[in-house]
Amino acid sequence: MNLKENLSELRATTKLQWKLASMIPGTQRQTLLRQLREISKNVSCPHNESEILTVGLEVLSIPKDREGYVVEAGLYKGGSTAKISLFCKLSGRKLVAFDSFEGIPENTEEHAKSTLGHSLEGWFAKGTLCGSLDEVKANIEKYGEMEVCTFIKGWFENTMPDFKEKIAVAYLDVDLAASTRTCLKYLYPLIVSGGVLYSQDGDIPLAAAVFRDERFWEEWEEEVGFKMPHIENLGKKLIKVTKNV
């Protein structure tokens, strides 16, 4: 990140930490923040701290009487999974984590630059961004809360159609437009009213374009019965969709 991006990230993180202070007692909060820093230090994490804090605070904010799992799609080395598992433990939620554990699937998508101007050349070739299931589990065992985690291994189009559980919060970090469509198709219908879906891929033009694609949503509405929802933060890295039906 450049200086402007670093300052923006610092301000966002500080604001979120203040919000966290209103939700978790001091000693427990300091322990959580230390654990999050430890994960970032020792596990490769493509996200910013403000982004994972946003998702974590969403998990902590789920009303106790609201049903639903926390779901993550796209784990890489398990850094985000370990962090989210800490929030799930605190909130009494289970985390279901989807990944092929074979890296990016074969694709013909041409990615040039992010919306921030960073090069994406070669980032999403077949097999890149790969973390094995054993590696992910080892990182969560060491830094997170394995007891709240369930892993579903395989390509999204093969595994997600069989998942039928209610979802309170979903977090996507899947990079490709095709993977984004698959996750929206199969996961969004399972989100409970008031539940939230985040996508980490708002700075990847092809992935973000899926959220803007009215034709996709129109076809999707015919297939699964939901209209295009209100989508927040289009044009920013962390996209948010709240389900209010």
Image (tube, helix red, strand yellow):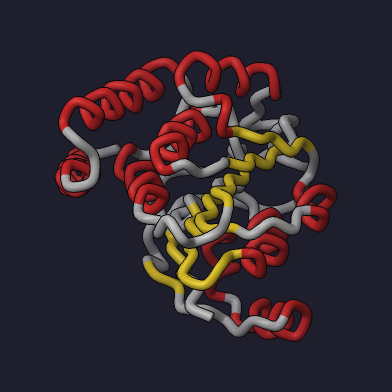
| Residue furthest out toward the front | 65
* Percent of width and height locating residue 161: 81, 57
* Percent of width and height locating residue 169: 51, 55
Where residue 235 sits, quadrant-wise, is: bottom left
Above or below: residue 40 compared with residue 205: above
Tell me if 27 is positioned left or right of 193 in this view: left
> Which residue is nearer to you in this view: 81 or 64?
64
Q: Count all numbered tags in the image, as a single digit.
A: 0
Residue beneath the point at 62% across and 66% down: 188
Above or below: residue 205 compared with residue 49: below
> Which residue is nearer to you in this view: 67 or 142?
67
Above or below: residue 88 compared with residue 186: above
Q: If the image is split into quadrants, where does the N terminus sit?
A: top left
Tell me if 46 is positioned left or right of 213 in this view: left
Q: Is residue 46 visible?
A: no
Residue beneath the point at 61% across and 47% down: 174
Above or below: residue 216 compared with residue 41: below
* Percent of width and height locating residue 143: 45, 19
Residue beneath the point at 54% across and 17% down: 141
Residue beneath the point at 70% across and 33% down: 103
* Percent of width and height locating residue 84: 46, 37
Q: Can residue 79 be seen in this view?
A: yes
